[in-house]
Image: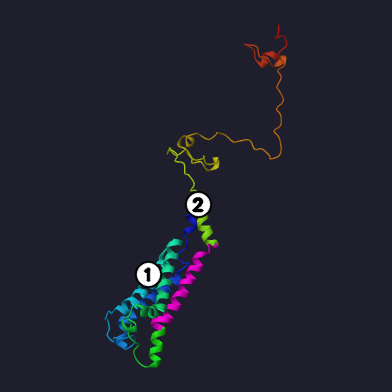
């Protein structure tokens, strides 16, 4: 449930930014507008009257604060509260002046009359009161509509938040085991291997693909036996064997 309340900050970014700008316009223009003779009487800049405060500055501040909350909040409920606050501020821009006749003295509103001619007066009433309130309510309603729908991206964020994090087992640190031995052909030559003398004498050449010829066994005959004290010469004389 708490995971679905999370919302990306880009969800109400555009509506929140526009509400912030409208709130600044509605709250500051009554105070600086007299510099250009644009606003409501009295024609004095930075002059706070009950009409300016309650019918222009306060609803402008509400629109500004609500837009700022909708712009910066990542919680769906808190961002919706900001949108509702901006909607109430915009609605007060539209109905505040007519309702102020209920508590005004002698049937006159607490907000002064618009300055200038007919065209300027129409522009002042639209841009500083009624038109400003309509646009603020519209943008707040758009922000509320976007916040009321749980999109695919919101569901993915909620599922990712509800997914338990994997538990990482801590293993004791042991000495690194020696790596695999390199192949025989790549082993470095050890000093004791270099001291082995090479074989002496020529090696018998062997034709590849042939097997060595077997050596026949040697037999010893009676005539090959040598008697001590005799030689081959005495053995060949007649009567030598007597």
The answer to whether any part of residue 232 appears in the image is: yes
User: What residue is shown with label 2?
Assistant: 162
Q: Please, what secondary structure does the residue beneath circle 2 have?
A: helix
From the top left corner, tell me how far across and down residue 111 is, in percent. Answer: 33, 82
From the top left corner, tell me how far across and down residue 217 is, in percent. Answer: 71, 23
* Residue 131 shown in magenta: yes
Which residue is at 69% across, 13% downward? 235
Residue nearer the viewer, 219 or 48: 48
Q: Which mark is residue 121?
A: none
Q: CA distance from mark 1 to mark 2?
A: 32 Å
Q: Main secondary structure of the magenta part?
A: helix
Quadrant showing the C terminus: top right
Q: Which residues are magenta?
A: 127-151
Q: Residue furthest top?
A: 242
Q: Is residue 104 left or right of residue 161?
A: left
User: What residue is shown with label 1?
Assistant: 65
Q: Is residue 230 left or right of residue 188?
A: right
Q: Residue furthest front?
A: 106
Q: Is residue 3 left or right of residue 54?
A: right
Which residue is at 49% across, 46% downward? 166
């Amino acid at each position: 449930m708490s995971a679905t309340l999370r919302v990306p900050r880009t969800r109400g970014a555009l509506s929140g930014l526009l509400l912030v700008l409208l709130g600044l316009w509605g709250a500051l223009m009554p105070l600086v507008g007299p510099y250009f003779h644009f606003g409501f009487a009295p024609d004095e800049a930075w002059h706070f009257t009950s009409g300016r405060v309650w019918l222009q500055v306060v609803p402008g501040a509400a629109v500004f604060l609500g837009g700022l909350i909708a712009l910066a909040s990542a919680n769906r409920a808190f961002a919706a509260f900001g949108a509702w606050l901006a909607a109430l501020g915009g609605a007060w821009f539209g109905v505040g002046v007519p309702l102020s006749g209920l508590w005004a003295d002698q049937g006159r509103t607490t907000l002064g009359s618009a300055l200038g001619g007919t065209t300027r007066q129409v522009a002042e009433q639209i841009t500083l009161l009624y038109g400003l309130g309509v646009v603020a309510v519209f943008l707040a309603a758009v922000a509320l509509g976007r916040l009321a729908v749980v999109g695919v991206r919101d569901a993915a964020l909620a599922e990712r938040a509800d997914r338990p994090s994997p538990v990482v087992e801590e293993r004791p640190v042991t000495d690194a085991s020696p790596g695999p031995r390199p192949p025989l052909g790549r082993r470095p030559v050890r000093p004791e291997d270099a001291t082995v003398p090479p074989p002496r004498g020529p090696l018998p050449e062997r034709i590849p693909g042939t097997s060595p010829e077997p050596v026949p066994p040697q037999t010893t005959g009676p005539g090959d036996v040598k008697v001590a004290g005799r030689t081959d010469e005495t053995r060949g004389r007649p009567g030598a064997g007597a």
